[in-house]
Amino acid sequence: MERRFQVRRQVASDRTRGVTGREARRAMGESLNVTLDWTALLDVAARRLCGNALQSLGDEPVFCPAWPFTLKGADWSTSKITAQLLIGWNAGFSDFEISDSLTPADWDFVAPCLKGKIAPRRARRSDCNSNPSRSSSPKIPPPTSR
């Protein structure tokens, strides 16, 4: 099975087509929409636990550090990276803070933090790592057309 990790970024924009057929685009806002898509192999118990935890989030926001932009706290003031929301943590992850008023120099490491929501998604048959030789593999019925 192929393991993949995809990141898609976009700014919502409006496209209009003029009389001459030329296309014009304009941004509808300044927010960057980030979509993460990945595949994970889990046994049945872990899959149920993960599914229940995600389902219990409901409309709660989730936070994800933008790991590629991680810097030492002391180096943050000289970087060109800006963010409204930061996460700071100590070496060994003994303590952390997510805040819009974080003082980077107080932390060993700092990264911009993405805030979003888990979009509901219907499970697909390919989402299960079903192995016909194992009777404990989860089975999801194929989607029915309405």
Image (spheres, rainbow, N blue to C red):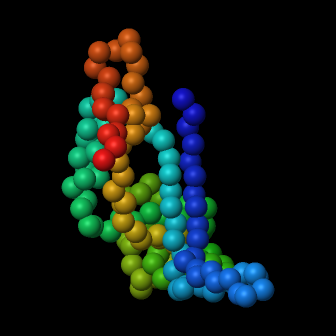
How many numbered marks appear?
0
The residue lying at 45 percent from left, 39 percent from top is 40
| Left/right of residue 104 with respect to residue 26 in the rendered view | left
The answer to whether residue 50 is above or below residue 109 is above
Quick one: 136 or 106, which is closer to the camera? 136
Residue 54 appears at what percent x and percent y? 29, 52
The answer to whether residue 51 is above or below residue 87 is above
The residue lying at 51 percent from left, 71 percent from top is 33
Quick one: 119 or 3, which is closer to the camera? 119
The residue lying at 41 percent from left, 57 percent from top is 93
Q: Residue furthest front?
A: 19
Quick one: 86 or 137, which is closer to the camera? 137
Residue 51 appears at what percent x and percent y? 28, 45
| Quarter occupied by residue 126 | top left
| Left/right of residue 133 with respect to residue 69 in the rendered view | left
Q: Quick check: can you spot residue 52?
A: yes
The residue lying at 39 percent from left, 78 percent from top is 99
Q: Residue furthest top?
A: 133
The answer to whether residue 76 is above or below residue 127 is below
Residue 74 appears at what percent x and percent y? 58, 76
| Left/right of residue 59 with respect to residue 98 in the rendered view | left
